[in-house]
Image (cartoon, coloured by chain):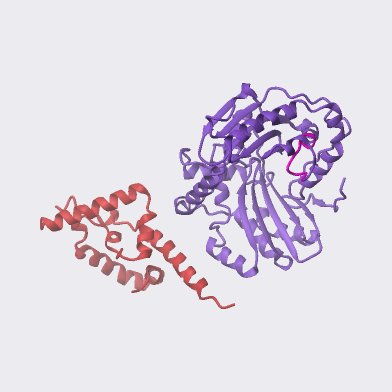
Chain colours: A purple, B red
């Protein structure tokens, strides 16, 4: 394993705190609101709530915060993942108290004005959704998630105009999600003792107690979706993965070829536009093998070859990929989102390609059907 | 023109002084009663100047039902003006119904505009 700088966790702070110091002048601070991602609640609501992130709160207006952050040279963003809403800020080390206070106000004291919902939140959410859906790979991934999990992790990541979400839905969801048990702070490049002190003094201390739980995961296979669209074509198949099997599928990804390991001689790297990746979430994962390209005929033959390559991975290829899998895990691991995956010598031993979900996006006249793979 | 914010501030100051409030409140009530807009079916907030960006923003933020009622009153007033009539006394807006439904939205819009102007000219 690559050596990790020791991270310290505080138990006395009002919210869970994980931080580490680093050399240099830059600090990053992420407020992760667990169980507030798109897997929870009504579809579309978590995305809209994430767009409320840095709008007016009881202490400061959105405009003032934006201008002040600009003057301090900080950058901030609010995004939704399938698991959580993440508010993050990057700034110079000396501005830590300002940003801890601002992020605390953003999470603990939002003012939720109705006009912000129609004037700012909805248009930005729709623009973000439209930009994401312009990419066929994203459309394919959304369809694979929907087939594999249906509810929970299968819910659409972004809000779309055909979901009827009201302002009150968002407010109610915020009240249930923004609790002390759900919020955790991950900071790097900060002094741990200072951070704990600033957090205790900030609005984070005023978060209501309690926590929410994630919805149960049920998985499904054998579904097929075909989405006709212009532009590039994507064909992909996916297998839902239980949390205990992450290591096994990391080995499979490394043996088959994955874009995290550049320049490996694995079979998928010989197919143009092919990739395999294990998407890891808190309660379940999704192993996706995809082929992307502008030429639908090349994608059609590519996905057939990719399926063959994954189905025919030999035991020796799998055991030979253990080291590569360890490297791949280490490369994907970040301080903010760490998955404790222990790859061992016989992790990938029992892999056999079973039933999967299949999606074809783009020129569906040419792309193959699932039973033709 | 004085901003709505400064007018509200001044009237709050007047109301905070019992002597002034006792003297001026009946005057203000009489002025509104004789101004005649209630006989045209209007509330005081309907006749606040709306031809500026701040008022437009405030009006656009009104809840749908309040906005509908406002438009209905304005159409009523137009119709009365065209036909050169006044509403009968029982149809005129009652003083207790003459609420300040738009003022909070105007104050918020003005606050935003003033803050933006302040930040645009900030010296660091």
The image quarter containing residue A154 is: top right
Q: Is residue A368 above or below residue A15?
A: above
The image shows residue B5 at horizontal and vertical percentages of: 40, 68
The image shows residue A169 at horizontal and vertical percentages of: 51, 41
Q: Residue at x 87, y 34 (%)?
A: A320
The image shows residue A155 at horizontal and vertical percentages of: 58, 35
* Residue farthest left in this picture: B84
Is residue A260 part of the magenta span, yes or no? Answer: yes
Q: How many marks?
A: 0
Q: Residue at x 45, y 50 (%)?
A: A118
Q: Is residue B59 left or right of residue A242?
A: left
Towards the viewer: A55 or A236: A236
Towards the viewer: B37 or A258: A258
Q: Is residue A186 left or right of residue A82?
A: right
Towards the viewer: B110 or A300: A300
Q: Which stretch appears magenta?
A: A253-262
Towards the viewer: A3 or B54: A3
The image quarter containing residue A321 is: top right
The image shows residue A231 at horizontal and vertical percentages of: 53, 41
The answer to whether one can see residue A152 in this image is no
Q: Is residue A58 left or right of residue B66?
A: right
Q: Is residue A117 above or below residue A241?
A: below
Q: Main secondary structure of the magenta part?
A: loop
């Amino acid at each position: 394993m690559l050596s990790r700088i020791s991270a310290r966790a505080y138990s006395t702070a009002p919210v869970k705190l994980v931080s580490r110091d680093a050399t240099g002048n830059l600090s990053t601070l992420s407020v992760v609101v667990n169980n507030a991602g798109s897997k929870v609640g009504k579809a579309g609501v978590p995305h809209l709530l994430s767009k409320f992130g840095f709008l007016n709160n009881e202490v400061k207006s959105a405009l003032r915060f934006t201008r002040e952050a600009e003057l301090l040279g900080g950058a901030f963003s609010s995004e939704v993942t399938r698991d959580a809403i993440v508010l993050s800020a990057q700034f110079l080390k000396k501005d830590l108290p300002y940003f801890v206070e601002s992020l605390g106000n953003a999470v603990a004291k939002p003012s939720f004005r109705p006009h912000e919902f129609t004037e700012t939140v909805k248009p930005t959410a729709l623009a973000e959704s439209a930009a994401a859906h312009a990419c066929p790979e994203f459309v394919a991934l959304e369809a694979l998630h929907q087939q594999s999990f249906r509810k929970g992790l299968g819910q659409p990541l972004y809000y779309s105009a055909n979901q009827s979400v009201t302002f009150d839905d968002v407010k109610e969801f915020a009240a249930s999600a923004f609790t002390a048990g759900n919020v955790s702070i991950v900071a790097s490049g900060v002094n741990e003792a200072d951070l704990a002190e600033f957090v205790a003094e900030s609005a984070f201390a005023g978060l209501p107690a309690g926590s929410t739980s994630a919805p149960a995961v049920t998985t499904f296979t054998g579904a097929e979706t075909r989405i006709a669209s212009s532009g590039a074509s994507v064909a992909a198949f996916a297998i839902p993965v239980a949390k205990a099997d992450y290591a096994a599928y990391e080995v499979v990804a490394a043996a088959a070829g994955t874009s995290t390991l550049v320049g490996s001689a694995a079979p998928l790297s010989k197919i143009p536009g092919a990739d395999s990746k294990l998407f890891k979430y808190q309660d379940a994962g999704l192993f996706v093998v995809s082929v992307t390209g502008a030429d639908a005929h090349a994608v059609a033959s590519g996905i057939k070859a990719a399926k063959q390559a994954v189905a025919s991975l030999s035991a020796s290829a799998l055991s030979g990929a253990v080291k590569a899998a360890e490297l791949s895990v280490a490369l994907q691991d970040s301080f903010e989102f760490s998955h404790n995956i222990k790859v061992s010598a016989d992790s990938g031993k029992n892999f056999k390609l079973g039933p999967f979900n299949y999606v074809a996006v783009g020129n569906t006249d040419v792309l193959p059907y699932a039973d033709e793979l | 023109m004085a901003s709505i914010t400064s007018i509200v501030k001044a009237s709050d100051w007047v109301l905070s002084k019992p002597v002034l409030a006792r003297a001026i409140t009946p005057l203000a009530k009489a002025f509104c009663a004789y101004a005649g807009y209630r006989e045209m079916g209007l509330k005081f907030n309907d006749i606040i100047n709306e031809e500026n960006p701040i008022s437009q923003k405030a009006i656009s933020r009104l809840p749908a039902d309040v906005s509908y009622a406002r438009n209905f009153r304005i159409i009523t007033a137009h119709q009365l003006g065209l036909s050169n009539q006044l509403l009968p006394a029982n149809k005129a807006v009652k003083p207790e119904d003459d609420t300040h439904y738009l003022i909070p939205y105007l104050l918020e819009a003005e606050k935003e505009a003033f803050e933006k102007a302040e930040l645009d000219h900030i010296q660091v």
